[in-house]
Image: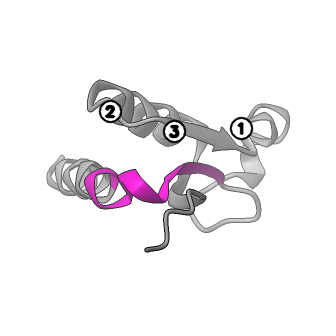
Amino acid sequence: MNSEIYAVEIFDGNEWEASLVKSLLDNAEIGSFLKDERMGVLAPWNVAGGGAGPVKIFVSNIDYEKAKEVVRQYEIAEGQE
């Protein structure tokens, strides 16, 4: 049985979106961390989902499926507004 724990990217977007999704993950009791969030502060015009320097959110591979559902619900809600 493989019990290795490692970080998996679950989301990327601008700083505002990443902060919101991280908050949703925190509320679901899923540990996560942001990568490249300073780039969003220093050069926000370069940071967009899939852009030159998106802010990325990582979770544990153990929480990946649960986190994926949280992100999916966020993306559905954003598409309806």
Reply above or below: 23 against 18. above
Mark 3: give few (<14), some (14-19) or many (20+) Cα within 10 Å.
Answer: many
* Residue type for callout 2: Leu
The residues tagged by marks 3 and 1 sit, at their Cα atoms, a distance apart of 13 Å
| Picture disc at residue 32 | 3
The residue carrying mark 2 is 24
Q: Image quarter for residue 34? A: top right
The residue carrying mark 1 is 37
- Is residue 59 inside the magenta stretch? yes
The residues tagged by marks 2 and 1 sit, at their Cα atoms, a distance apart of 17 Å
Which residue in the rendered view is the most extreme toward the right? Answer: 42
Reply above or below: 3 against 16. below
Instruction: Determine whether, in the image, residue 65 is placed left or right of residue 18.
Output: left
Mark 2: give few (<14), some (14-19) or many (20+) Cα within 10 Å.
Answer: some
In the rendered structure, which disc, 2 or 3, sits on the residue that comes first in sequence? 2
Closer to viewer: mark 2 or mark 1: 2
* Residue type for callout 3: Ser
The segment highlighted magenta reads 55-67
* Residues at circles 2 and 3 in contact by the CB criterion of under 8 Å: no
Reply above or below: 17 against 54. above
